């Protein structure tokens, strides 16, 4: 299934080196990639292959050491610090393996933290409804299960109607049934909000929910394979 | 030697925690420094004083007498309890110093011809001993010599008993009797205008017209002798020679001042260090609890490897021990430095030979022990937590901190807050003890700072009130002996004198029930304008003819109140006795006494029409003319000008307080900064993940810093008003603690002191918080988010 082709991200010979000299680690060795608006891209690859580094660079958490990384017409490689912060604030939603909720705020308040500063957010309750937590608005993180916490994190990420949603192993710490709930929330956001979504996973089975699957090895893209058909998460089994 | 692995871990952890170690150790060091300074100085001063008193045979009892023939001294020596005595001639004279208009008064004391005095020895500091064959050779006291740039070889023109004579200064000396040399009627030393002159017994006897007799005796008592019995025996023996009542050291002004100073030092040593140590205990508790929380999995690992509870307890206790030793070492160094400075101030005020700051080993041992105790006390809870942690639970990640809603009322109020502010509010409420620790620490720092500013304010107030509201004369003329009140008319005719008011002062013994006090009774005219008694509202209280007015201090000592009757007996003259009703109690700041209306006083003591001094109001342009005239008037033994007295008092009070006020600013800011730094550090460590999350979510550094700083800021806002109230209470209390026989420190509210203190403390807190805030700039967004808690 193909969507209209207006790239959100355009990466040209993107490189990232940590350290110097003998100790240098080449995390990205020249990545070229275009990502279309509304696309759901799954990144696969062994640990240390560069997928997380790519996600961090796309999210404005890390700076590349070479090449360019355009979000629309902003080059994230050379943008000012304050501009990158603004970029994160307006366009990016993050979901991490460890949920990183603020323990002192309720589910709803965690989401509101973002909606308060976003230009055109959806109501926090609506975002939580979208991830199936409409009844747990006033619970503190310590009162929620792991899957619920991750779904709050997703609600927090999508509530501002981000342009891109970046998910780094969002199901890594969860069991299958819970993981399916979380993936459903991500797919729902992608479908309903047309949010360009990148999802890192170790699990090749999960790759079937995406439009394209990008396989990483040793800092390179080894292959890019479009899925003929996106599979709904409920049909996955791993 | 190879360090045990745990100790290597300790060293590396300490390196990581070094800023926190510095914060905690600094606060500990402040407490230790104050302890070392005050205790060391107390010991040094007491030791120097006792050594001096001992080696120079300071008198235990003294008495003055109108005139007793020399052989009476032999009788006195036989009295029970008397170990040694020196029968002397002593009196007041005027000195005319070149280039000095204001007259200088001097206490003249006789020296035995062929030996040192047996009591109140005189120590030669420069020059030589007077030649007994030369009448005009004298020694002068060190403070007077220094203040007036006099050295052996100088000449003094002295008016003694109505006759001028030239005196040759041959030596400079000191004596335990005049460690603190104060002119009669004055409260504080004015070495520029008061000196002690020692001259040969024969010559001085002739000068004062007491040839073959003495008018002053000083005694050393036998060890274990009962001073009261001996005093009674002396008074009985001297009654027929005009004895003026013997008294012990507690009525000798010089000794009294030293005793006062020692008691202030003791108060300081017992009150101030504990405040700092208490704050250090809290700080250690917070820091080490946080350390144990972050080391949770390490503790689990160590236990699973088979490390016992004792090794684990010792490992974490070692952090506290290192903090304590660091604080103690720093505190001892600073305390020694401050002690040395204090000793230098003391040597300017108190003339005690070999007075130096010399704290003995026990002071340092105590300092280290107290520091260790405080540190271990602070660490105890955290160490116990490490010990009690079951290994399996320690290896599992900690349950997320469970937050709850604040009280419904607060939640409603917080509804309008943004998320970041709500985070701050809930954290403060979630960790109430830690929040309270921060608040209390900042409060104490502010309170200390306010209190420290209070001393100079209080002292200046004393001077302002005493020499402005209470005493309004320009000069006080003291007569050589009580004079007929016709002398007042002569005083009125002196150049420039505009108005004159009399004073009659006498040493009396006041008795109420079983309590007895020797003090001064002052007779003043009703409606006196130049010397007034004040009540607490600064309103004048008139002396009354129908009874006696007491100072609060004296009333307390006698245990009497308004309406009670005290019996008053003069120590000389007719030794008249009278029962008087207490009609008022007043609170003078300086050395209170007893007061009566002048005529009633004369009737009670059966000495009508006598005066001891005159207060005058005068034309300032005539000061030189008045001085010239006074120097030629034998009946006037001394003149003291109010402006001189007030200036020298201010100088003495400010001598020490300037430096110590500065020291307190530094110490209080260290305390406030240390508290704020530790609190901000812990908050940062606990919230690092949340802060990084906020950054990832697109919040700017400024917004994220707000979450960190608002917590400290909110606590600061709570602490400032609370600290101001505590400061007011602490000042009031401390002023009362430092009250002595001679001084009462009033509590004065001065808004600027509060404002200034709050500003300093707030600056220290904000500085510390901003130092921690720099961590926000260095947040490792990726690293923090990828790691489990």
Image: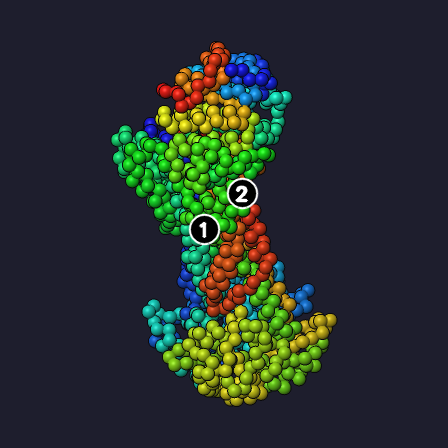
Seen at 45% across and 39% down, the residue is A137
Q: Disc 1 is attached to a residue of which chain?
A: B
Q: Mark 2 and mark 1 in contact (Cβ < 8 Å)? A: no
Seen at 45% across and 86% down, the residue is B579
Can the viewer see residue B10? no
Disc 2 marks which residue?
B418
Q: Quadrant of the N terminus of chain B?
A: top left
Label 1 secondary element: helix
Residue B373 image offset from top left, x and y in percent: 35, 47
Q: Nearer the viewer, residue A145 or B604?
A: A145
Residue A13 image offset from top left, x and y in percent: 57, 13
Q: CA distance from mark 1 to mark 2?
A: 17 Å
Residue B529 image offset from top left, x and y in percent: 63, 78
Quarter occupied by residue B271: bottom left
Q: Residues within 10 Å of mark 2 (few under 14, many from 20)?
A: some
Q: Residues within 10 Å of mark 1 (few under 14, many from 20)?
A: few
Q: Nearer the viewer, residue B572 or B471?
A: B471
Q: Disc 2 is attached to a residue of which chain?
A: B
Q: Is residue A73 above or below residue B446?
A: above
Task: Indicate which disc residue B408 carries.
Answer: 1
Q: Quadrant of the C terminus of chain B?
A: top left
Label 2 secondary element: loop
């Amino acid at each position: 299934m193909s969507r209209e082709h207006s790239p959100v991200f355009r990466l040209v010979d993107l490189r990232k080196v940590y350290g110097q000299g003998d100790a240098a680690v080449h995390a990205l060795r020249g990545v070229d990639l275009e990502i279309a608006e509304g696309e759901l891209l799954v990144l696969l690859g062994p640990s240390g292959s560069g997928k997380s580094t790519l996600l961090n660079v796309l999210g404005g958490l890390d700076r590349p050491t070479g090449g360019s990384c355009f979000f629309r017409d902003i080059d994230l490689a050379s943008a000012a610090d304050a501009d990158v912060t603004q970029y994160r604030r307006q366009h990016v939603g993050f979901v991490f393996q460890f949920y990183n909720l603020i323990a002192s705020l309720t589910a709803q308040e965690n989401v509101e933290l973002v909606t308060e500063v976003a230009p055109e957010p959806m109501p926090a309750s609506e975002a939580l409804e979208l991830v199936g937590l409409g009844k747990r608005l006033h619970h503190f993180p310590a009162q929620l299960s792991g899957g619920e916490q991750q779904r709050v994190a997703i609600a927090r990420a999508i509530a501002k109607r981000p342009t891109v949603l970046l998910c780094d192993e969002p199901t890594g710490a969860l069991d299958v049934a819970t993981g399916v709930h979380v993936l459903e929330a991500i797919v729902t956001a992608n479908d309903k909000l047309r949010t360009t979504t990148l999802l890192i996973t170790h699990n090749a089975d999960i790759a079937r929910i995406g439009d394209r699957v990008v396989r990483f090895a040793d800092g390179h893209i080894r292959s890019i394979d479009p899925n003929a058909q996106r599979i709904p998460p409920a049909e996955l089994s791993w | 030697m190879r360090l045990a692995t745990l100790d290597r871990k300790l060293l590396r952890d300490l390196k990581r925690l070094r800023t926190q170690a510095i914060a905690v150790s600094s606060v500990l060091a402040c407490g230790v420094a104050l302890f070392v300074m005050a205790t060391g100085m107390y010991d040094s001063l007491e030791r120097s004083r006792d050594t001096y008193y001992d080696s120079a045979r300071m008198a235990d009892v003294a008495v003055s007498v109108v005139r007793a023939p020399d052989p009476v001294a032999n009788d006195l020596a036989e009295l029970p309890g008397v170990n040694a005595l020196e029968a002397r001639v002593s009196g007041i004279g005027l000195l005319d110093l070149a280039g000095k208009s204001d007259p200088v008064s001097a206490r003249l004391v006789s020296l035995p011809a062929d030996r040192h005095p047996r009591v109140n020895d005189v120590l030669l500091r420069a020059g030589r001993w007077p030649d007994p064959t030369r009448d005009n050779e004298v020694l002068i006291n060190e403070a007077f010599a220094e203040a007036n740039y006099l050295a052996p070889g100088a000449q003094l023109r002295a008016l003694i008993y109505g006759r001028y004579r030239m005196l040759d200064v041959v030596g400079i000396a000191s004596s335990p009797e005049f460690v603190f040399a104060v002119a009669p009627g004055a409260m504080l030393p004015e070495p520029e205008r008061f000196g002690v002159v020692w001259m040969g017994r024969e010559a001085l006897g002739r000068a004062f017209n007491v040839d073959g007799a003495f008018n002053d005796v000083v005694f050393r008592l036998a060890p274990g002798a009962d001073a009261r019995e001996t005093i009674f025996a002396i008074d009985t023996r001297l009654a027929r020679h005009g004895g003026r009542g013997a008294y012990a050291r507690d009525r000798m002004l010089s000794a009294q001042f030293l005793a006062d100073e020692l008691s202030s030092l003791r108060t300081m040593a017992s009150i101030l260090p504990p405040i700092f140590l208490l704050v250090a205990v809290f700080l250690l508790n917070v820091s080490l609890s946080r350390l144990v929380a972050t080391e949770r999995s390490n503790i689990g690992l160590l236990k699973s490897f088979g490390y016992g509870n004792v090794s684990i307890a010792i490992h974490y206790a070692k952090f506290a021990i290192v903090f304590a030793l660091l604080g103690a070492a720093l505190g001892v160094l600073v305390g020694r430095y401050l002690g040395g400075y204090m000793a230098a101030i003391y040597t300017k005020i108190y003339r005690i030979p070999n007075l130096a700051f010399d704290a003995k080993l026990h002071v340092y041992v105590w300092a280290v022990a107290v520091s260790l105790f405080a540190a271990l006390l602070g660490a105890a809870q955290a160490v116990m937590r490490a010990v009690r942690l079951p290994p399996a639970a320690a290896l599992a990640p900690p349950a997320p901190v469970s937050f709850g809603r604040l009280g419904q009322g607060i939640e409603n109020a917080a509804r309008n807050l943004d998320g970041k502010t709500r985070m701050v509010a809930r954290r403060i409420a979630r960790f109430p003890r830690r929040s309270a620790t921060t608040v209390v620490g900042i409060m104490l720092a502010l309170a200390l700072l306010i209190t420290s500013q209070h001393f100079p304010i209080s002292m200046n107030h004393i001077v302002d009130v005493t020499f402005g509201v209470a005493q309004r004369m320009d000069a006080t003329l003291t007569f050589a002996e009580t004079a007929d009140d016709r002398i007042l008319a002569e005083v009125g005719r002196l150049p420039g004198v505009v108005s004159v008011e009399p004073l009659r002062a006498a040493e009396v013994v006041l008795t109420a029930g079983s309590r007895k006090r020797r003090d001064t009774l002052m007779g003043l005219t009703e409606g006196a304008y130049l010397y007034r008694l004040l009540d607490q509202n600064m309103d004048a209280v008139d002396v009354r003819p129908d009874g006696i007015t007491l100072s609060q201090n004296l009333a307390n000592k006698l245990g009497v109140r308004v309406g009670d009757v005290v019996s008053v007996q003069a120590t000389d003259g007719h030794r008249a006795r009278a029962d008087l009703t207490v009609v008022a109690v007043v609170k003078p700041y300086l050395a209170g006494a007893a007061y009566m209306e002048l005529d009633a006083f004369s009737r009670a003591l059966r000495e009508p029409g006598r005066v001891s001094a005159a207060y005058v109001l005068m034309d300032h342009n005539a000061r030189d003319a008045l001085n010239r005239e006074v120097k030629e008037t034998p009946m006037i033994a001394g003149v003291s000008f109010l402006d001189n007295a007030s200036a020298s008092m201010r100088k003495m009070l400010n001598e020490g307080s300037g430096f110590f006020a500065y020291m307190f600013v530094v110490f209080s800011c260290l305390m406030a900064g240390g508290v704020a730094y530790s609190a901000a550090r812990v908050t940062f460590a606990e919230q690092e993940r949340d802060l990084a999350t906020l950054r990832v979510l697109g919040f700017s550094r400024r917004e994220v810093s707000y979450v960190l700083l608002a917590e400290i800021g909110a606590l600061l806002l709570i602490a400032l008003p609370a600290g101001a109230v505590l400061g007011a209470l602490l000042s009031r209390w401390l002023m009362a603690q430092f009250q002595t026989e001679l001084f009462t420190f009033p509590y004065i509210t001065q808004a600027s002191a509060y404002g200034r203190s709050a500003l300093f403390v707030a600056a220290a807190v904000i500085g510390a918080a901003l130092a921690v805030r720099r961590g926000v700039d260095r947040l490792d967004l990726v690293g923090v988010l990828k790691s489990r808690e």
